[in-house]
């Protein structure tokens, strides 16, 4: 069995696309997932499954949610080694002490033509970013709520992205250690 991290995009935001975590666990169990742990309502799960093909399992999870809840969320599935590599590859380790200012964007695929010049022009003086393959690291000391860079990054990268702050990344990393036996 392999350990996977499932990052769900756009669930439990506002009053639409509701998916209680207890129901998510039930759906995942129905698909043969084991040792499931979830973190906060925005859609983070760590699980074990026999499937080797992450795209296949992500597709099955998304389809089962559509069947159960009537909407099909984007599910990005990483194995535990990929996730650990993303964590250890953080180019801004000094920002980890303020985990709400450091963000890790997980991209659906490596961008073919990211508009890095436009991204650079949008960033505030205090902001920094690094694109590494399918990962987008953003340090926004003044917060992402008012950040033009954060607001435009997915569009300018040209691929779907789901973002987690460093506090969430660390919590997921802890859950992986509990599940990854």
Image (tube, helix red, strand yellow):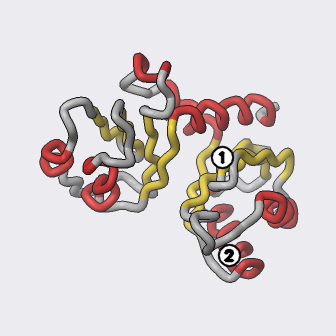
Quote the CA–CA distance across marks 2 and 1: 17 Å
Query: Dividing the picture into quarters, in which one does residue 169 lie?
Result: top right
Q: Identify the residue at image location x=44%, y=38%.
A: 103
Q: Nearer the viewer, residue 33 or 103?
A: 103
**Badge count:** 2
Residue 65 in which image quadrant? bottom right
Judge whether 20 appears above or below 134 on screen.
below
**Residue 140 on image: x %, y %:** 34, 35
Q: Which mark is residue 161?
A: none
Q: Quadrant of residue 90?
A: top left
- Pinpoint residue 98: horizontal percent, then vertical percent: 47, 24
Compared to 61, does 4 lie above or below? above
Residue at image coords 30%, 46%: 147
- Residue 5, disc: 1
> Callout 2 environment at 10 Å: few (<14), some (14 to 19), or many (20+)?
some
Taking 98 as reference, is 180 left or right?
right
Q: Secondary structure at mark 2?
A: helix
Q: At 58% across and 64% down in the image, what residue appears? A: 13
Q: Position of residue 120 (x, y in %)?
A: 17, 42
**Can you identify the residue that label 2 sits on?**
63
**Location of the N terminus (image quadrant):** top right
Q: Residue at x 81, y 48 (%)?
A: 36
| Residue 92 x/y as whole percent | 38, 23
């Amino acid at each position: 069995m392999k350990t996977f991290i499932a990052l769900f995009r756009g669930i439990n935001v506002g009053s639409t696309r509701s998916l209680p975590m207890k129901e998510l666990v039930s759906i995942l169990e129905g698909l043969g997932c084991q040792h499931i742990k979830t973190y906060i309502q925005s859609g983070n799960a760590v699980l074990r499954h026999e499937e080797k093909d992450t795209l296949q399992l992500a597709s099955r999870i998304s389809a089962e949610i559509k069947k159960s809840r009537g909407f099909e969320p984007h599910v990005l599935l990483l194995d535990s080694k990929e996730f650990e590599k993303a964590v250890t590859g953080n180019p801004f380790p000094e920002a980890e002490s303020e985990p709400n200012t450091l963000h890790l964007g997980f991209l659906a695929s490596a961008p073919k033509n990211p508009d890095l010049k436009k991204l650079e022009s949008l960033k505030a003086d205090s902001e920094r970013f690094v694109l590494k393959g399918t990962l987008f690291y953003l340090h926004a000391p003044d917060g992402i709520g008012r950040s033009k860079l954060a607001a435009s990054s997915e569009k300018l990268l040209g691929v779907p992205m789901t973002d987690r702050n460093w506090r969430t990344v660390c919590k997921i990393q802890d859950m992986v250690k509990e599940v990854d036996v």
